[in-house]
Image: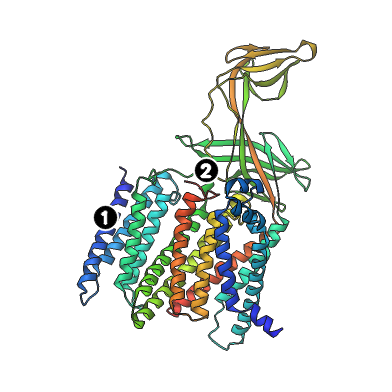
Amino acid sequence: MKKFLAWISSMKLAIGLIAYLAIASGLATLVPQGLTDDAYRGMYPRLLAELVVQARFGAFFTSILFIIPAFAFFANLSACTVKRLARELGKKKGRRHGPDVLHVGLVLLVLGGVWSFSGHKQGSVILAPGEGANLPDGSTLKLVDFRYDRYPDGRPKDWVSVVTIEKDGKALIEERQLRVNEPLRHAGLTFYQSTYQEAPALALVDASGHEMTLAQGEERFVGDTAYYFMAPESGAGGATAGSAAMGSAAMGSAPAAESGKAVVRVGSGAEAKTVRVGPGEQVGELRVVGLKPMFASGIEAVSDPGYPLVFAALLLIALGTAITFFQKIREGV
Amino acid sequence: MSANIILANAAFAVFLASAGVQMFFLFKRPAKPDAIGPSALLAASAALIAALALRSFEIGFVALTSTYESLAFYAAAIGAIAFAYRFQKRLPYKPQAVFGATMVAIVLLAVASSPLIPKDALPPIPALRSAWLLLHVSFSFIGEAFFVAGFVTSVAFLAAKSDDKRLELDRLTYTAIAVGYPFFTAGALVFGAIWAEQAWGRWWSWDPKETWGLVTWLVYTAYLHLRLVRKRKDVLPAWISVIGFLCTVFTFFGVNYLLPGLHSYG
């Protein structure tokens, strides 16, 4: 037992495992992760492809090639941490606790990371302004507005969702802006602005000048007459459907012009008529303004039970490195 | 040509002039070490920081979002560290170390000024609009600038013949890495993970840039444990320091151009 404890807390083992994890992780980045076996067979020569497939190198960070050495490293790190801490506490003076804080932070980071990974739940929803999604605690996340701002050169500047969270008709969170890098945390969930969708909508105006917008597939009554926007006419250049993820450098398309024809069903039942109308034309009692791009916001909800532990561990790592740094500076490195 | 590019080009010219002056002193070997070359490095670094400040005003955000801006900041950090090393009193002064660091900064600025690197001052896309960007990028590059110093002194160590010289160079390498490591740990790993959670909802994604950042950190962790705990002062820590620097180079250039991932912002 003594021999095993000496071995598990040895520096030689630590260096060996660090070297293995560094080399293997580096090599794993050269193999695209998460592809099918057939994809690797099509990508590499036979022998190399079989090596990647059989060794599960295509899913390296969840394979035993990574998990077992990582677990061994965790055991080594934990043993070293305890050993070092005990040694420092035994000293009468000249204690250096910076590395201890750093090591404890790393141990907690591994534990928090495993907890976070195993308990991580996420789901996403696409909401148009006015729509809502039910949350597990019985409240409703409602999208009040979505804005897509661009720089003059067309690159995306900001995606902003204005949301509220309501329960039983009472606002738990009043209108809050949700942006990339500015998530909203509520009841154990974190909401992220993750994507958007752009779809054509039809703008109509009544005799009094009041404008209304119909999303594709939306029906609305004006008086007794139903107006149903079926689709933009094939080839209509006014608005184009599109979407983009926001984690990367999504460029998006330029804002669409209000042109092109729309296919609209007017009236209901046997009296319904399907017509093709363009800007300035009359449809029932309404006049067509044109097609407009309408944005829907993609919001991702994440539940991460390991959040407090991982956050605390990262703070300890930063604190441990800072204490070590200032101790070393004081001692002249 | 905009003012910030003119200023950055002037800084590049001063780096080159500094290298010339340092080379002259290296060959002449005067009794008193060269003060002009290292002082010029401080002026050049200040000019680079001023150029980045001008760009920041222009784009309305901290100018650390493009490859060009990162390279300029990296070179400025190396220049400032080389200057500080020249005028400190605690460590033995090796003019070759300052010269080596100057050459690395010159290479970085040469890459930055090449036509391959876009120089347009563009405001950032939403994914990069975060206060964490400043901490993540600046701390990582300050750490890596110290690793450059460690690399230069390690190469000198490997080339040195006398044991006394090797001991001095080993001390310099260890000091550079011991100072750079906390900056790199905080910038690349801690601030990077916190920002990733805020932006993507995940602390870690095993994205190639993250993985190579971790590989770099592991290599320098191995160096510190060998040097500090095992008290190794032979060629092994020096080689690990060289490998660590090569990892930083691959993390910056190799991953950007060869391995697409979440950090592919162009």
With B76 as the anchor, is A130 left or right in this view? right
Q: Which chain carries label 2?
A: A
Task: Indicate the position of residue A267 as horizontal and vertical percent values.
Answer: 74, 14
Task: Indicate the position of residue B94 as horizontal and vertical percent values.
Answer: 31, 74
Count of picture labels: 2
Which residue occupies 65% across, 58% down?
A55
Task: Indicate the position of residue B96 as horizontal and vertical percent values.
Answer: 30, 70
> What residue type is disc 2 on?
Ala
With A183 as the anchor, is B60 left or right in this view? left
Which quarter of the image is occupied by the N terminus of chain B? top left
Mark carried by residue B13: 1
- Asked which secondary structure carries label 1, the reply is helix
Residue A220, above or below B89: above
Which residue occupies 64% across, 50% down?
A34
- Asked which secondary structure carries label 2, the reply is loop
Mark carried by residue A153: none
- Quarter assignment of residue A212: top right
**Foreground: A110 or B194?**
A110
* Residue placed under numbered mark 2 in the picture: A249
Q: Mark 1 lies on which chain?
A: B
